[in-house]
Image (cartoon, grey):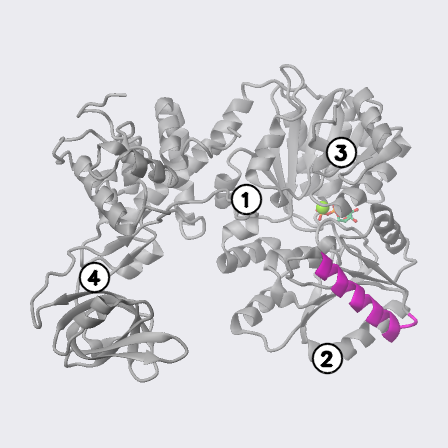
């Protein structure tokens, strides 16, 4: 490709920059850098302040600073590790430079009285403050050496691409941006029309880029580190917009895709609701209405139902399933864990078989005849409803007329997985409807970004008569007391969970710990009927234990966190969680949601291991003081970051260069507004904007 001076920077290859040959270009690709535009959008991770010399007397451990002084003494120490110690001072104080790797020439340079300038991180040493392997330069004693004019950016780097290289190419790219390079380079397109962003008074794009790459000396490092400078906010806005548009495009595409029209009358749903021992709450009815509206349209529904733990999402899902079945379509219900999927299987069988509807089970561990007959029933359409884990969406599973896919606890699946599932079950021109459910409620603004591909409904009401779970925080030192409490409750006919948590990598170790605890509890509480469930039990054994607990022939269920999602035994009213300080708040709230599902007062004991850190104490207090999933999710996001809570971090999704969902939450409403306007007025700006921020590889829905 030949390029000309007037080419836009988004197609100008990075090789136009000095020092970037084919080899370097290859390495830069690892950083996602191919064009001059990519260089400009390779943003600093943090900054160093080399714009001023700091007096040694003012240094504090942890500071990163430039110092200048004279060498007082240099000596090699033979301790546990041979090291070269260089004592320097500047009249205000002194500092020791410590080198573990050094050569003779280097050592010889440190003569008494030589001038030296260093940059490094200050640590407290045995006698004076120290810098370990600082960058340094010998200078004429007392010479005035120019300091940096700008805060020094520190870029994400990779093998063979060092900070100096990155500084050099960003410097050159900024010249191109100004059109002031030797080659008087091209133009950086601004995809945001001024009139759309004018109301938000944002920095211009070139000014924002110039500022974040080369902040002026008076810039506040603190503001920059926090990412709250207006220049950074301008870029964060654009990045959030790109993510939002990428997801929204998935939704728009659905409007050009066909789906079965499911406009069943009230028949099956009515019969089902009438068979329940309770009436649907107002919120459940409203959300069901929204779902039925979607199903009646000839385009695939993509709806997220958010509802706090215990709000009754499963019944709503069952009603949606019945609509599809009545219209002659099959339904697939998928849950993230075998245990939850099995629970749903049993629940749906109990609900639907009396209505003459066959329910099939297909999990990852299904084998032999059971497996083949389930697959057969799904293929022939005999099974109107199939329940299982993600195994349901493997190649070998063929549906006859799949009309609706329901995904429970979707935050356990990643964004990409969710989108990949959209295309499953495609039948000629038609795609099934999709209903996803989550118990990790997030604020509306956040949902608009993270779930921009989905319409959302909220079940914002708990079934009547629910009492908030009464939660206490108790030290392991009082374990015996807690055990007595379990004994008293269980012998009085209540049921309880004892949850063993471990953050061990290995599931085997977790299960072992739970086994030990179960043994110990069984010995200590002989009059309590105890059973154990964990992830390593055979499916049949797990099912037997859960059935026994549900039938109340087991009083105390010792479990690992496998019971976190979905398990529903309303008679259980007491939960002990060991070492709760090791879990995230949202996860604890989910776990605790296993109790408080009936009309009796439930209790939860958070049995922590002392000593508790101050943060841990505060986190457990949040749980003790609140039963509100929204509030708890918000606090959890503040403490651990949204990626961790929303399950997007593990899968590397929604990785932002500069934006931060929580910090920049105030931008999100404007992001949505501008996204809609941009789609309206300049749809051709959307793709290049997405490509700028997300690259070619990771656009949503392109997987
Ligand atoms: P979640 O929203 O956490 O998935 P579930 O669907 O498991 O909640 O429902 C929790 C419990 O509440 C179940 O025992 C369910 O049968 C019951 N339930 C659901 N809806 C109602 C209602 N409208 N009135 C009373 N109980 C209900
Ligand atoms: Mg549920």
Q: Secondary structure at mark 1?
A: loop
Give the alpha-carbon distance from disc 1 to disc 2, as whole Å: 39 Å
For disc 2, the marked residue is: 478
Q: Nearer the viewer, residue 692 or 23?
A: 23
* Mark 4: few/some/many CA within 10 Å (<14, 14-19, 20+): many
* Among the two numbered marks 1 and 2 on one chain, the one whose residue lies closer to the N terminus: 2
Q: Tell me if the residue at label 2 has its CB under 8 Å from ligand 1.
A: no
| Horizontal relation, residue 61 to residue 91: left or right | right
In the image, the segment drawn in magenta is 508-527
Q: Say which residue appears at 26% left-offset and 35% top-offset.
A: 21
Is label 3 in contact with label 2 (beta carbons under 8 Å)?
no
Give the alpha-carbon distance from disc 3 to disc 2, as whole Å: 46 Å
Q: Quadrant of residue 465?
A: bottom right
For disc 4, the marked residue is: 50
For disc 3, the marked residue is: 319
Q: Say which residue appears at 26% left-offset and 42% top-offset.
A: 201
Give the alpha-carbon distance from disc 2 to disc 4, as whole Å: 54 Å
x then y, percent, for residue 80: 41, 78
């Amino acid at each position: 490709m030949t390029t000309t001076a007037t080419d836009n920077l988004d197609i100008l290859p990075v090789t136009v920059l000095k020092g970037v040959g084919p080899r370097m270009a290859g390495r830069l690709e690892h950083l996602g850098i191919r064009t001059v535009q990519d260089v400009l959008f390779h943003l600093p991770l943090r900054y160093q302040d080399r714009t001023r010399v700091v007096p040694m007397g003012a240094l504090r451990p942890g500071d990163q600073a430039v110092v200048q002084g004279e060498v007082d003494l240099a000596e090699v120490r033979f301790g546990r590790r041979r090291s070269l110690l260089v004592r320097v001072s500047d009249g205000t104080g002194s500092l020791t430079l410590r080198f573990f790797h050094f050569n003779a020439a280097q050592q010889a340079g440190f003569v008494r009285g030589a001038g030296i300038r260093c940059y490094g991180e200050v640590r407290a040493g045995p006698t004076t403050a120290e810098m370990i392997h600082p960058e340094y330069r010998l200078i004429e004693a007392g010479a005035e050496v120019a300091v940096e004019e700008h805060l020094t950016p520190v870029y994400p780097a990779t093998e063979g691409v060092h900070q100096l290289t990155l500084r050099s190419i960003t410097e050159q790219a900024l010249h191109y941006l100004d059109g002031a390079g030797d080659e008087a380079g091209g133009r950086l397109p601004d995809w945001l029309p001024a009139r759309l962003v004018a109301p938000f008074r944002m920095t211009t794009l070139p000014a924002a880029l110039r500022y974040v790459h080369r902040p002026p000396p008076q810039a506040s490092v603190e503001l920059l580190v926090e990412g709250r400078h207006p220049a950074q906010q301008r870029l964060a806005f654009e990045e959030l917009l790109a993510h939002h548009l990428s997801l929204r495009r998935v939704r728009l595409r659905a409007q050009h895709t066909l789906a079965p029209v499911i406009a069943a009358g009230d028949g099956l749903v009515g019969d089902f609701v009438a068979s329940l021992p309770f009436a649907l709450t107002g919120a459940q009815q409203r959300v069901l209405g929204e779902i039925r509206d979607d199903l009646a349209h000839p385009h695939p529904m993509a709806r997220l139902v958010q509802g706090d733990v215990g709000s009754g999402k499963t019944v709503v899902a069952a009603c949606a399933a019945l609509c599809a079945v009545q219209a002659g379509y099959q339904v697939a219900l998928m849950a993230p864990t075998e245990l939850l999927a099995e629970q749903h299987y049993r629940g749906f069988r109990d609900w639907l078989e009396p209505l003459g509807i066959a329910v099939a089970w297909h999990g990852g561990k299904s084998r032999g005849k059971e497996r083949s007959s389930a697959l057969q029933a799904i293929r022939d359409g005999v099974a109107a409803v199939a329940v299982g884990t993600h195994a349901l969406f493997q190649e070998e599973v063929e549906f006859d007329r799949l009309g609706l896919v329901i995904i429970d606890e979707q935050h356990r699946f990643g964004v990409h997985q969710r989108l990949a599932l959209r295309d499953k079950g495609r039948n000629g021109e038609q795609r099934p409807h999709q209903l996803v459910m989550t118990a990790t409620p997030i604020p509306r603004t956040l949902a608009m970004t993270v779930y921009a591909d989905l319409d959302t409904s909220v079940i914002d009401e708990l079934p009547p008569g629910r009492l908030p779970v009464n939660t206490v925080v108790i030290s392991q030192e009082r374990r015996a007391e807690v055990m007595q409490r379990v004994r008293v409750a269980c012998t009085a006919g209540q049921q309880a969970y004892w949850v063993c948590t471990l953050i061990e990598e290995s599931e085997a170790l977790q299960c072992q710990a739970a086994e030990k605890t179960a043994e110990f509890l069984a010995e200590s509480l002989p009059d309590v009927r105890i059973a154990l469930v964990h992830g390593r039990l055979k499916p049949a054994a797990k099912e037997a234990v859960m059935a026994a607990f549900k039938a109340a022939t087991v009083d105390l269920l010792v479990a690992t966190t496998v019971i976190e999602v979905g398990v529903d035994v309303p008679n259980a009213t007491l939960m002990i969680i060991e070492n709760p300080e090791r879990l995230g708040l949202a996860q604890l709230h989910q776990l605790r949601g296993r109790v408080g599902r009936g009309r009796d007062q439930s209790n939860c004991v958070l049995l922590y291991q002392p000593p508790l850190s101050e943060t841990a104490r505060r986190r457990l207090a949040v749980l003790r003081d609140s039963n509100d999933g929204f509030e708890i999710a918000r606090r959890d996001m503040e403490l651990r970051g949204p990626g961790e809570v929303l399950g997007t971090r593990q899968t590397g999704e929604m990785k932002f260069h500069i934006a931060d969902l929580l910090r920049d939450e105030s931008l999100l409403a404007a992001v949505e507004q501008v996204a809609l306007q941009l789609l309206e007025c300049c749809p051709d700006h959307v793709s290049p904007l997405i490509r700028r921020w997300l690259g070619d590889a990771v656009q949503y829905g392109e997987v």
